Amino acid sequence: MQNIITQVLRVAFYAGEEILRFYGDKDFILKSDNSPLTSADLASHTYLCQELLRIVDIPICSEENELEYLKRKDLARYFLIDPLDGTKDFLAHNDEFCINIALMEKQNNQTLPILGVIYAPALHQIYFGAQGFGAYVITNLKKDFFDIDSLDTTSLLANAKKLPLDLISPDKHTALISNFHHSSHTQDFLQHYSLVPKALGASLKFCLVASGEAYIYPRFIGSKEWDSAAGDIIIQESGGIVLDVETKKPLCYNKPHIKNNHFIAFSQQALKGAIYKEFCNGRI
C-alpha cells in the first residue's frame, strides 16, 4: 500500500499540471445535469485514467465516465475519481478546486475507500490518507517534488504534517459550507448550533475538517460518491468520521445510483461535542 500511495500522489500532482494549463480559460459546456464541463476536466480525466492503470490494472469509475453498476458491483477493487472537483470554483478562478482519487476495496461485503488523495493544484496542497496509515498534508508543494524517481514513503512523510494538525486552539465553531450550493436546511442547522459558516470550494471542506481547522461539515444537498470517498478516508484516518444523516452510519459506497444521502463530516474535536451526541441520539 505504501508504494501505491506514493505513486498515486505523483499521478495526482501531474494531473494537476494538466488542469493548470487551462486555468483562466472560461469556456465550458453544460452536461445533462446542468453542471459545467471544461477542457481541464477532460484533460485531467484522460491523464488520470492512463496513469492510474499503470499503477494498478483495475477498473476506474470517473465522474466523466461512470462505470455502470453491473460492471462494478462485484469488483474487489477499483479507483473512484473526480478529475476536477469544483469546476465552478475553477471557472471562478478562486483556486479552490481539487482532484479526488480514492481506491475502493470490498471488505466484508462492503465497498470502502481505503486510500484517498485530494490535491488542490492552485493552492499547492495535497492531502492523503490510507487505511491504517494515517492522514497527512503537504503544503507549499514544489514543482520538482515528484520528479525524484526514488521518492518513497519515508521521504514523503518527512515533508508532510500529520492530521489533525497540532493547533494551539482547535476550532469549535466553524462549519464549512459550499461556495455555490446552499440550502435552508443547512442555514437552520448553523443557526440552531450557533456555528460560524465558512464557504470553501470542493473537497477542501473535508480537508479542513481532517486538519482540525474546521469543526464540522454538514452536507444537506446532493453529492456523488466520487465527491466524498477520498475525503471520507482522510477524515477517518485523522480521527474524525463522516456519517449518513438518515442511517446514522458511515456512508455507503458502490450503490446502483452512486448518489450520497445527506451527511455530516465530524472532526476529531467534534466527536467530543454536543452536536455529535445529539446526532447519535437521533435528534438531527
Image (cartoon, rainbow, N blue to C red):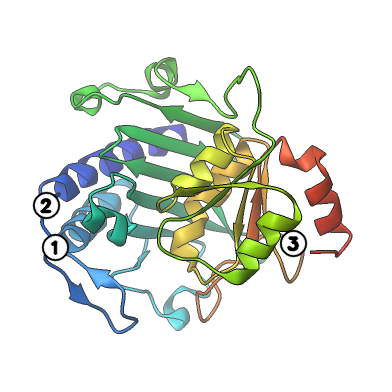
CB atoms at circles 1 and 2 under 8 Å apart? yes
Percent x, y for residue 244? 68, 64
User: Residue 199 versus residue 166: which sits nearer the camera?
Assistant: 199
Q: How many marks?
A: 3
Q: Earlier in the sequence, mark 1 or mark 3?
A: 1
Q: Earlier in the sequence, mark 1 or mark 2?
A: 2
Instruction: Look at mark 2 in the image and give the residue it sits on.
Output: 22
The residue carrying pointer 1 sits among few (fewer than 14), some (14 to 19) or many (20 or more) residues within 10 Å by Cα, namely some
The residue carrying pointer 2 sits among few (fewer than 14), some (14 to 19) or many (20 or more) residues within 10 Å by Cα, namely some
- Name the side, left or right, on which 219 lies relative to 81: right
- Name the side, left or right, on which 64 lies relative to 247: left
Q: Which residue sits at x=45%, y=29%? A: 137
Give the number of the disc on residue 72.
none
Percent x, y for residue 103? 46, 52
Q: Earlier in the sequence, mark 2 or mark 3?
A: 2
Q: Is residue 67 visible?
A: yes
Label 2 or label 3, whichever lies nearer to me, is: 2
Look at label 3 and name its amino acid. Lys
User: Residue 76 versus residue 122: which sits nearer the camera?
Assistant: 122
Badge 2 marks a residue whose secondary structure is loop
Q: Which residue sits at x=85%, y=55%? A: 278
Look at label 1 and name its amino acid. Ser
Instruction: Look at mark 1 in the image and give the residue it sits on.
Output: 39
Give me the C-alpha separation between circle 2 and circle 3. 39 Å
Badge 1 marks a residue whose secondary structure is helix
Q: Which residue sits at x=69%, y=56%? A: 191
- Name the side, left or right, on which 234 lies relative to 24: right
User: Residue 9 versus residue 259: which sits nearer the camera?
Assistant: 259
Instruction: Look at mark 3 in the image and give the residue it sits on.
Output: 249
